[in-house]
Image (cartoon, rainbow, N blue to C red):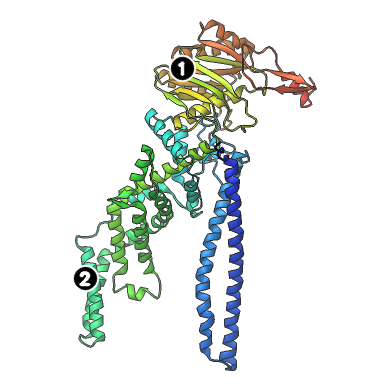
Amino acid sequence: MLASPPSARDEYQTRLARWQSDREHWNRRFRQLGNARLATGLAAVAIAAVSLGAGWISAWWLLAPVLVFIPMTIVHDRVDASLAKASRAVSYYQRALARVENRWVGEEKSGAGSSGERFRDPKHLYADDLDLFGRGSLFEMLSTARTAAGERILAEWLLAPSTRAAAIARQSAIAELRDRLDLREDLAVMGQEIRAAVDDRTIKAWGERPLVRFFPGARVVAFLLALAAVATLALFIAQVLTLRWFLAVILAEAIFGFMLRPAVMQAAASATTPALELELMGGLLARLERESFISPALAALRGSIAAEGVPASRQIFRLRSLVHHLNSARNMFFAPIAAPLLWTSQFAMAVEAWRARCGARVGQWLAAVGEFEALCSLAAFAYERPRHAFPDLIESADPQFEAQGLVHPLIPSAEAIANDVALSGSGPRLWIVSGSNMSGKSTLLRAVGVNAVLAWAGAPVTATSLRVSALRVGASMRANDSVIDHRSRFYAEISRLRDVMDVVRAGHPTLFLLDELLSGTNSHDRRIGAEALLRGLVERGAIGMATTHDLALAEIAMSMDGRATNVHFEDHLEGGEIRFDFRLRPGVVARSNALALMRAVGLEV
């Protein structure tokens, strides 16, 4: 009988223990080499004192500590790099274990992750309502991306549904990446500076901006002048020519340099930062280039990172070399040599030639890395949730959302209570969810919304099965008043409801999620307004759910000819405490727990 594969937690713990052992090993080596370097330095001082001061031994003995110190320094640097790599791996698996064990909230503060706070938009139709971004958000749990491009692309997938073809292609890519732990580990242990350093949009703009123009043949003239300077100087030293020939060449170079100065300065000033940041991306690209893939989406990504048949990483390392040589002219010792060689001009023109050849592809390379990182984030999610399935993304003119065993992805698996949900044209299009406080109504709505978002991002969903058609999600669950904007909570809510209705009126298949509908007004107006709104949404073809404490609103379902139904959550008293089972039941809730909750927190009612 075949043994079952290890769980994500077991695998992560095994790998974490291995990397922790490596880190301890390299840390010991680092300290030992540091002590050895110190001892070598002290030995050099002692030898200098004995040889130069007392004259007891030859000064040539000073070569001994120098010859020991140089290779020791090289080894020490390599050990330092190995220690840093092990430390990054330990951090990666500690965060992975935190996800599995539900300890991941707030890790952005330690630099271990990102909450995606910068992607928050209060005006978005569902992002804030479904807790997509911010502390304790879906994004914080999902994202393992280390570049700005990876984070942004993952956020874009969550903020808008993809086409069916794109989502299915991602499903195939995620399924292929799911078990490639070694690949995800390799990406994680690369230079830790990547997240902070790489601004992909700025680099893309640099690659695509108009080229700095030099007059035709400028590179050839610069090379010939530099060659002439070397030749005339050599012939002067050999006493074949007088110095005036060399000086004449220098004068010609000065005139040439003056003509090119504005263009050279512009090219040199703009190249350093993009080259440094692209260098950090080169390692990620090189690792991606070594992989082979089966799924069309990954194969297309792999094929997109070559320029004229040359791998992107090689092109980036070529740029790094050019800019390194360009900046070397700033060295005070090399500058006198660089000047007659027209060093800065030649390498500035070479950088612009690189941009002419590869600049338009830079954005494509960065996008490929970002998309790959976003796919790896979702692949890790799939690996850590093996019991959950990829949804069946169906083509249907009528909106459908039919889930079995649905849970909220942010609730630990051991605590989550699964429920079935079915909304479609062939059955009820509207569920009116009643129940007491804290019984699970809002969590159910968020579970439905978040899983719809995951489904059309191409990710697995936290359900045993899900059939879902293409849907726009519209939610009103977290309307807040604003003193600055002079808006009441009720006005904020009805403004969001208008936005949801506008999407439905535009003919988009829509899933609406409305929590405590129109709770900011009196019961009479609430009853009339809620019925008109829900009826309008359903009659225009939308599907969705609305929660309420007002049992009068539950009567709306009875007047909608089978297109709506009532469901509820219950609670019960046990040992003087309110207990919830979070299981969905048909019908209208029979009791409220508001007074009991008020008494439980010490209010006299």
As shown in the figure, which amino acid type bears the numbered disc 2?
Leu
* Residue 118 position in % (x across, y down): 51, 41
* Residue 232 position in % (x across, y down): 23, 80
Residue 527 lies in quadrant: top right
Name the residue carrying label 1: 542
First in sequence, mark 2 or 1: give its number.
Answer: 2
Residue at figure coordinates x 76%, y 27% from the top left: 601
* Residue 419 position in % (x across, y down): 59, 22
The vertical placement of 268 against 440, above or below, is below
Q: Is 110 positioned to the left or the right of 604 in the image?
A: left
Q: Is 543 positioned to the left or the right of 342 in the image?
A: right
Q: Nearer the viewer, residue 279 or 22?
A: 22
Number of numbered labels in the structure image: 2
Tag on residue 487? none
Extreme residue toward the bottom, this view: 55
Name the residue carrying label 2: 224
CB within 8 Å, label 2 to label 1: no
Q: Is 24 positioned to the left or the right of 67 in the image?
A: right
Residue at figure coordinates x 30%, y 56% from the top left: 354
Residue 444 lies in quadrant: top right
Q: CA distance from mark 2 to mark 1?
A: 73 Å
- Quarter of the figure with the N terminus: top right
Residue at figure coordinates x 39%, y 28% from the top left: 164
Q: Nearer the viewer, residue 179 or 437?
A: 179
Q: Nearer the viewer, residue 319 or 572?
A: 572
Secondary structure beneath disc 2? helix
The vertical placement of 573 against 84, above or below, is above
As shown in the figure, which amino acid type bears the numbered disc 1?
Ala
Secondary structure beneath disc 1? loop
